[in-house]
Image (cartoon, rainbow, N blue to C red):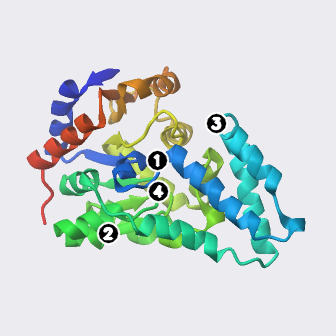
Amino acid sequence: MQLTMTEALPIMKNLLSERKLSIFAGSGISVDSKLPAWDGFIDKYIEICDDLNASLDPSLQFTEIIADARASKDRDLISTITALKDKVKECKDHGINTDFCDDELNALFYAAIPNEYHEHIVSTDYKHIITTNYDSLLEKAAKKLGYKALLTRSYSYTEQQNLSIAVYSGKTAIIHAHGKISDIKLDQFVLTKDDYLAIMKHNPGFRLIINSIFLTNSVLFAGYGGSDPHFEDIISDLNMTLNWDNGSTDLPRCYIMLRKDKVTPIREFLNGKNRVDIITFDDYGQMKAFLKELADEYPRAF
């Protein structure tokens, strides 16, 4: 189903009034903080791999793979990015110090400051805040606005015990589904569906937590676009592990906010999938106003 923002707003408010709405935030919410969206991040990743390549002995360089990545990333992302990650790992296996690459990525993320999207999200009484972003901008926004308790419940997917305690006790957590920049190295970024599935396979406790959230809450996706594969990865995993999209009317619905010119690829992916509704808007200012209205009407307690 496709909804206008006017149609979707009372639905979101009703879910918040019952405390049955969580939010899943993608890279689009951090663009105003001068961080790259999905396409830009891939370009930055290739650029840093190129810097690493230039520092290597010619016998270890992978210039052709970088050229292939630049030429084919829009057509064959999985194979090109996997090849780059394998080369970075190979460098580490040869004892080559790649810390300067990690430092370059860290500098990009740590310099960013939160924007209104982050502030509206942490200010709203969502049941949980989940993100595929590596940055700490949600935490910075929580600190800026004085949400001290929320700051103490920020977890990576690896922190399964503490995360499960927070989730199953009903306390709101900030959940980094792909990890945090402070813990991630150049060869560990989640860039493909296989990377995401590997997290779920090797962290079964985390998969149970994510599944439980989707089984008990509606989830609003914000900051995902047609070129960002992470939304599709998440929905595909839910369908695989839970038979989530079995047509049952008893399960909570999910919603994804999309600019009208970004709808087509997601709508094609969702064809026949009955659990997700699309909320459309004309420009990102409307999405920001939508999230602000939810924050104003259903604020998080300090």
Left or right of 65 in this view: 174: left
At a point 39% along the width and 55% down the height, the residue shown is 34
> Percent x, y for residue 186?
63, 65
Question: Do labels 1 and 3 touch, CB within 8 Å?
Answer: no
Using the numbered discs, state the Cα–Cα distance from disc 2 to disc 4 in whole angstroms. 14 Å
Q: Is residue 14 visible?
A: yes
Residue behind mark 1: 37
Question: Which mark's residue is nearer the viewer, 2 or 1?
Answer: 1
Q: Secondary structure at mark 1?
A: loop
Left or right of 294 in this view: 160: right
Residue behind mark 3: 74
> Percent x, y for residue 15?
20, 40
Using the numbered discs, state the Cα–Cα distance from disc 1 to disc 4 in whole angstroms. 17 Å
Decide which of tag 3 and tag 4 comes sooner along the chain: 3
The amino acid on which the numbered mark 3 sits, given as a three-letter code, is Asp
Decide which of tag 2 and tag 1 comes sooner along the chain: 1
The amino acid on which the numbered mark 4 sits, given as a three-letter code, is Ala
Nearest the viewer among 204 and 141 is 141
Nearest the viewer among 22 and 68 is 68
Residue behind mark 4: 177
> Percent x, y for residue 250?
33, 32
Nearest the viewer among 119 and 238 is 119
- Other residues around mark 2 within 10 Å, as few (<14) / some (14–19) / many (≥20): some
Q: Is residue 180 visible?
A: no
- Other residues around mark 1 within 10 Å, as few (<14) / some (14–19) / many (≥20): many
Q: Tell me: residue 180, above or below residue 75.
A: below
Quadrant of res 291: top left
